[in-house]
Image: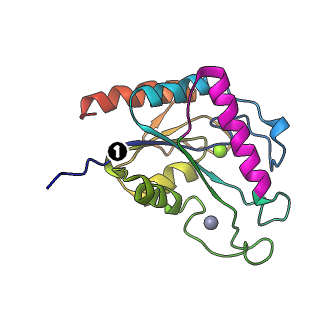
Amino acid sequence: MHETRRRRAFFLDRDGTINKQVGYCGDPAKIELLPDAAKAIRRINEMGLLAIVVTNQSAVARGLVTEDQVRRVNAEVALQVARAAGGKLDAFYYCPHHPLEGKAPYRRECDCRKPGGGMLKQAAAEFAIDLSRSFMVGDADIDHEAAKSAHERIITFELPSDYSMGRADYRAGSLFEAVERALGLASGFGA
Ligand SMILES: [Mg+2]
Ligand SMILES: [Zn+2]
């Protein structure tokens, strides 16, 4: 019987982490990557970790953006990452819900909306990810909380923003810095 080797992942928030924060955004033309974000994702690829985006998009529930627009913006982010550095995002998960705003079917309590861990757990099931050896980076406390909700041993990095109070395991000045530090830690406990 063969042992199935589960993979490690680097989970990434999207807005304010990979691309500049642009509010509720349904327009791919507004997407602008943060400095060295594409290079950081390429580094994740080179180290053999999955690069998986987990993003709250309550603009859908609020009726400001359609799911199709969310997918087009995601595709634009992926395209820019590929063009800028040859980086590859392995998957995007988004939560279109809000517990209080908007209408059914989007107005509801869900586990996918960060700080819930649902998107990470879904990715773990679909990609056979070992969450206990994975990482999360985001610019908000809810990114850290979502990771710890999915698995307490996910190592979290927080980027400076108005949404972060420094609750994550580590703070970093940029996505690239977070990835470099994470990969240094990763080599310490087995690839
Ligand atoms: Mg963010
Ligand atoms: Zn949701």
Percent position (x, y) of residue 68?
77, 56
Q: Which residue is drawn at 38% across and 56% down?
A: 151
- Disc 1 residue type (three-letter): Arg
Residue for badge 1:
7
Nearest the eye: 170 or 93: 93
* Colouring scheme, one of rainbow, by chain, secondary structure, one colour: rainbow
| Residue 119 against residue 167 in the figure, above or below | below
Q: Quadrant of the C terminus?
A: top left
Nearest the eye: 65 or 173: 65
Q: Residue at x 53, y 58 (%)?
A: 119
61 sits left or right of 48 in the view? right
Q: Residue at x 60, y 46 (%)?
A: 140
Query: Disc 1 on helix, strand or loop?
Result: loop
Whether residue 31 is visible, yes or no, is yes
| Residue 138 against residue 187 in the figure, above or below | below
- Region of the chain picked out in magenta, as a range: 68-89
Q: Residue at x 47, y 25 (%)?
A: 43
Of helix, strand and loop, which mostly describes the magenta segment? helix
Q: Does the magenta stretch include residue 78?
A: yes
Percent position (x, y) of residue 117?
49, 60
Could you say which quadrant of the image residue 53 lies in? top right
> Residue lying farthest bottom?
104
10 sits left or right of 77 in the view? left
